[in-house]
C-alpha cells in the first residue's frame, strides 16, 4: 500500500502535510478542518493526464458509494479553474475540486512527481494509502477502509463486466 512508491516522499504511515486551498466555487478547504470530520481522500491530477482521465470516474464512484459528512473526497488540480471545470464536466466529477496554486506548493509539499497520486489520510493525519497512477488494489483498499469507517457493507468496487487493468502508471 504505497510504501513501495519511490516517486513521492509521503508514504503510508507518514503524517500528511497540511494545506488550505480554494475550490472551484471559491470555498476554502483546510486539511486540518476536514480531518476533524473524518478521513480524506486527496487525489492530485492534471487535466491533460490520460491516466487521471481514466482514474477520476472511479474516484467519483468511490465518492458516490462512501463519501458523506464524515468522509471527504477531494481532487487537487494542477491546472487553472476553467480547464478544471471542463475536466469535471467531461469526466462526471461531482466531488470538490481544489486548485493547487501557481508553483504547486501542495503538490511539492507531498513530493509529487507523477499524477494521479492518491492519498487516503486518516482523521489522525496519518497516510493510510499512498497510491501513484491507477492501482486497482489500492482503490479497493481505500473503498474497504471507507466502508469500514462508515460501518457499511463493502460493495464490490469494480463491476464483473468491467475490464479494468491492475494498474496504469501515472
Image (tube, rainbow, N blue to C red):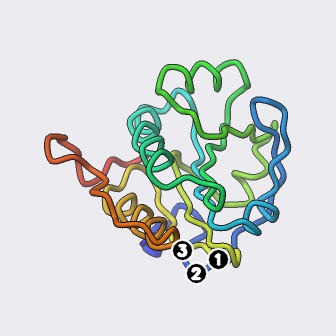
Q: Describe the element under mark 1 as helix, strand or loop.
A: loop
| Residue at point 47%, 45% (across, down) | 64
- Left or right of 2? Residue 105 is right
User: Dot 1 surroundings within 10 Å: few (below 14), some, or many (20 or more)?
Assistant: some
Q: Quadrant of the N terminus?
A: bottom left
Residue drawn 35% across the image and 66% down it: 153
Residue 85 quadrant: top right
Q: Nearer the viewer, residue 140 or 167?
A: 140
Can you give x and y, in whole percent of width and height, for residue 77 in the image? 66, 37
Residue at the spot of label 2: 13
Q: Which residue is mark 3?
A: 128
Left-right relation of 12 to 140: right
Circles 1, 3 touching at the beta carbon (< 8 Å): yes
Mark 2: give few (<14), some (14-19) or many (20+) Cα within 10 Å.
Answer: some
Question: How many other residues sit within 10 Å of disc 3, few (<14), some (14-19) or many (≥20)?
Answer: many
Label 3, label 2: how far apart the Cα atoms are? 6 Å
Q: Nearer the viewer, residue 36 or 106?
A: 36
Q: Position of residue 156 (x, y in %)?
A: 27, 57
What residue would you read off at disc 1?
A: 126
Q: Nearer the viewer, residue 32 or 165?
A: 32
| Left or right of residue 131: residue 107 | right
**Residue 122 falls in which quadrant of the image?**
bottom right
x, y (%) of residue 32? Answer: 80, 65
User: Decide: marks 2, 1 in contact (CB < 8 A)?
Assistant: yes
Helix, strand or loop under label 2: loop
Q: Is residue 49 above or below residue 2?
A: above
In the figure, residue 55 lies in which quadrant? top left
Residue positioned 55% across, 52% down in the render = 67
Q: CA distance from mark 2 to mark 1?
A: 6 Å
Q: Which callout, 3 or 2, points to the residue nearer the camera? A: 3
- Circle 3 SS class: strand
Tell me which numbered mark, 2 or 1, is placed earlier along the sequence.
Answer: 2
Amino acid at each position: 500500500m504505497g510504501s513501495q512508491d519511490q516517486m513521492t516522499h509521503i508514504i503510508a504511515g507518514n503524517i500528511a502535510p497540511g494545506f488550505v486551498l480554494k475550490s472551484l466555487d471559491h470555498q476554502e478547504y483546510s486539511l486540518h478542518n476536514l480531518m476533524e470530520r473524518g478521513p480524506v481522500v486527496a487525489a492530485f491530477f492534471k487535466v491533460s493526464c490520460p491516466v487521471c482521465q481514466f482514474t477520476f470516474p472511479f474516484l467519483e464512484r468511490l465518492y458516490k458509494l462512501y463519501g458523506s459528512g464524515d468522509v471527504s473526497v477531494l481532487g487537487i488540480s494542477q491546472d487553472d479553474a476553467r480547464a478544471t471545470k471542463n475536466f469535471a464536466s467531461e469526466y462526471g466529477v461531482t466531488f470538490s475540486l481544489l486548485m493547487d496554486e501557481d508553483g504547486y506548493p501542495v503538490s511539492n509539499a507531498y513530493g509529487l512527481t507523477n499524477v494521479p497520486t492518491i492519498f487516503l489520510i486518516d482523521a489522525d493525519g496519518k497516510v493510510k494509502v499512498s497510491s501513484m497512477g491507477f492501482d486497482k488494489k489500492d482503490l479497493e483498499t481505500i473503498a474497504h477502509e471507507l466502508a469500514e469507517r462508515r460501518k457499511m457493507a463493502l460493495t464490490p468496487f469494480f463491476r464483473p463486466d468491467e475490464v479494468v487493468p491492475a494498474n496504469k502508471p501515472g
